[in-house]
Amino acid sequence: MDQETPSSRDPVTLSGISTRAWEHPADRGALTALRELRGFDTMMRKVSGLLSERSIRLTYLGSGIKVDRHQFSRVHDAYMQVAVVLDAAEVPELYIVRNPDLGGMCVGIDKPIIVINSGTLDVLDEPELRFLLAHELGHALSDHGLYRTMLMTLMRLTTSLAWIPVGAVGLRVIIAGLMEWSRKSELSADRAGALAVQDPAAAIRVMAKLAGGGDLTDVDTTAFLAQAKEFEAGGDLRDSFLKLVMLEGRSHDFSVARAATLKDWIDEGDYLGYLAGEYPRRADDGDTSISHDAKAAAQSYRELFDRSSDPLARMLRKLRDQF
């Protein structure tokens, strides 16, 4: 008899799972540090009021389609499935908007909503759709909306304060740090998607479709993943510096890199243990500490540096080993 795999049966419900299960250490460390800033959440919620969170919801309520049992019922069913698997206490409102591109987003703070582009429905099959929905739900459950609002606000301030050299430079430094956090938060959401859909192949297909469009009939996912190694290790120091410059202004890492990172986590990380029931529980969230999360974040960067095949990283490791 063939051995049953997670992708060949109904997904395992992860009752009481904590967001710590999917949060990347660098994402988690930054979130913990920001939450420890006294009054920070209050300040950002006041900023949210200035940005009018109500107006955001009204915009989509008036210009999109609110997903429920009567509208886009297929999407609603998929959304409810991943919400059950991740044991979401509250499920954000979900909207479909007219946009031919593949994608979605989670916006808002106190009452986040999830918005999916209509083009997504044309190119994703059901497991792929569940992955994308769970990805956005993971953002909502991890409270990423609050800090994304901060990033959006600071980017607007950079434009308005461009005439003040010192102020603009300071804001750009902060924004660069938040962009790095944002890229790591996407890795967290990818893990949430993988845990919810429990079909690794579907997760990788979504990344391939983000990179090359909806038709994968002439795309080999193994070769697609091999691109990540070529992207990381190829070239010389000039390519290393170019990649750093290219990443600086991106809120998402490159699709091939995200696919490889997620594949590594599924193959080598805690993924299978979590599906077997060995995952962090929400009931234990109060026992975590900022120092532990900070150490885990630092360790993740050290491991990334030690494993990297990038020419600059190889050169820096060689210099380190000489002293």
Image (spheres, rainbow, N blue to C red):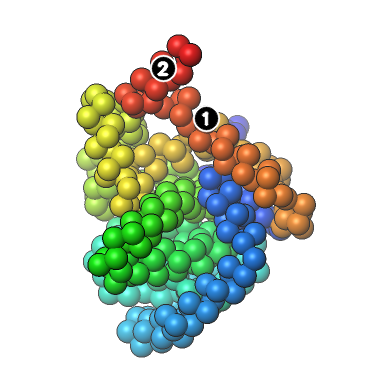
Give the mark nearer the N terminus: 2 vs 1. Answer: 1
Q: Quadrant of the N terminus?
A: top right
Q: Residue at x 24, y 52 (%)?
A: 213
In the displayed image of the protein, which residue is found farthest to the top? 322
Between residues 282 and 243, which one lies in front from this camera angle?
A: 243
Q: Residue at x 68, y 45 (%)?
A: 291
For residue 54, side relative to residue 233 (left or right): right
User: Label 2 belongs to which residue?
Assistant: 319
Instruction: Name the spot of residue 85 as percent of width and height, x first.
Output: 61, 58
Q: Is residue 9 visible?
A: no
For mark 1, give the secondary structure: helix
Label 2 to label 1, Cα distance in Å? Answer: 17 Å
Instruction: Name the spot of residue 97 as percent of width and height, x first.
Output: 32, 75
Instruction: Name the spot of residue 9 as percent of width and height, x first.
Output: 57, 48
For residue 71, side relative to residue 109 (left or right): left
Between residues 178 and 235, which one lies in front from this camera angle?
A: 178
Three-letter code for the amino acid on which mark 2 is drawn: Leu
Three-letter code for the amino acid on which mark 1 is drawn: Glu
Image height of 260 relative to 24, above or below: above
The image quadrant of residue 170 is: bottom left
Q: Nearer the viewer, mark 2 or mark 1?
A: 2
The image quadrant of residue 219 is: top left
Q: Residues within 10 Å of mark 1 (few under 14, many from 20)?
A: few
User: Label 1 belongs to which residue?
Assistant: 303
For residue 290, side relative to residue 120 (left or right): right
Q: Residue at x 32, y 48 (%)?
A: 248
The image's mark for residue 240 is none
Instruction: Name the spot of residue 256 as percent of width and height, x first.
Output: 33, 40
Q: Are marks 2 and 1 in contact (CB under 8 Å)?
A: no
Q: Is residue 291 visible?
A: yes
For mark 2, give the secondary structure: helix
Q: Residue at x 29, y 60 (%)?
A: 165
